[in-house]
């Protein structure tokens, strides 16, 4: 299949790669660019493991997104959240609240949480559960993930107050 060149800014770094017209963003991140922190779960839009951020705060399913359509766009993966060796508040909250067991769903959960808190800085439990719909975790039973999102909201509010 004919390939075309695209340029993506991933975690602040501009990267150019050749993609086939039917290649997904998930395939390009993992296979072309070696960014395996974005997980391949179902590949069909059912599990949320492949969630990345478009333009900083918009969660998208990279397994359902054609890479060619992302030419020129900004993508953030879980590896792009930390700053100056410090975990992002959302990542720290998942550690603090033990919202991680096997960790397979965690990159997608973290990216989805960044999106939830960008829209709703102080979400209720119901808003969190609604916001996380589509992200499946086989391990935690979700209660600790909801606690993690609440903790993340607190940490982000503290961070904003300190700035
Ligand atoms: S791998 Fe994309 S939703 Fe499951
Ligand atoms: S921690 Fe194992 S799938 Fe969520």
Image: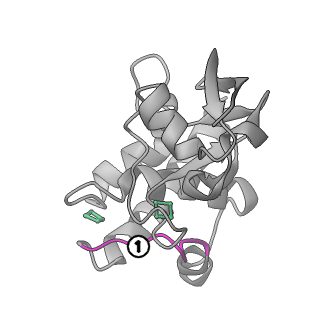
Residue linked to disc 1: 136
Q: Is residue 153 visible?
A: no
Q: Is residue 45 left or right of residue 14?
A: left
Residue 36: image quadrant is top left
Q: Residue 148 lies in magenta, yes or no? A: no
How far from the left and from the top, in percent, is residue 30? 43, 36
Q: Quadrant of the C terminus?
A: top right
User: In this picture, is 115 found above or below 76?
Assistant: below
Q: Is residue 146 visible?
A: yes
Residue 59: image quadrant is bottom right
Q: Which residues are magenta?
A: 131-138
Mark 1 C-beta closer than 8 Å to ligand 2? yes
Q: Residue 134 lies in magenta, yes or no? A: yes
Which residue is rendered at x = 20% and y = 58% of the image? Answer: 102
The overriding secondary structure of the stretch rendered in magenta is: loop
Front residue (pair 26, 122): 26
Q: Is residue 122 left or right of residue 149?
A: right
């Amino acid at each position: 299949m004919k390939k075309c060149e695209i340029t993506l800014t991933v975690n602040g770094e501009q990267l150019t790669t050749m993609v086939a017209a039917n290649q997904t963003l998930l395939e390009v991140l993992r296979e072309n660019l070696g960014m395996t922190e974005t997980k391949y779960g179902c590949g069909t839009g059912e599990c949320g493991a492949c969630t990345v951020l478009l333009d900083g705060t918009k969660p998208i399913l990279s397994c359902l997104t054609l890479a060619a359509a992302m030419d020129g766009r900004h993508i953030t993966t879980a590896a792009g959240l930390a700053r100056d060796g410090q975990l992002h508040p959302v990542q720290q909250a998942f550690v603090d609240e033990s919202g991680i067991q096997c960790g397979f769903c965690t990159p997608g959960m973290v990216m989805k949480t960044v999106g939830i808190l960008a829209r709703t800085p102080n979400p209720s439990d119901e808003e969190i559960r609604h916001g996380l719909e589509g992200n499946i975790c086989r391990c935690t039973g979700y209660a600790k993930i909801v606690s993690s999102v609440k903790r993340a909201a607190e940490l982000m509010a503290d961070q904003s107050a300190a700035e």
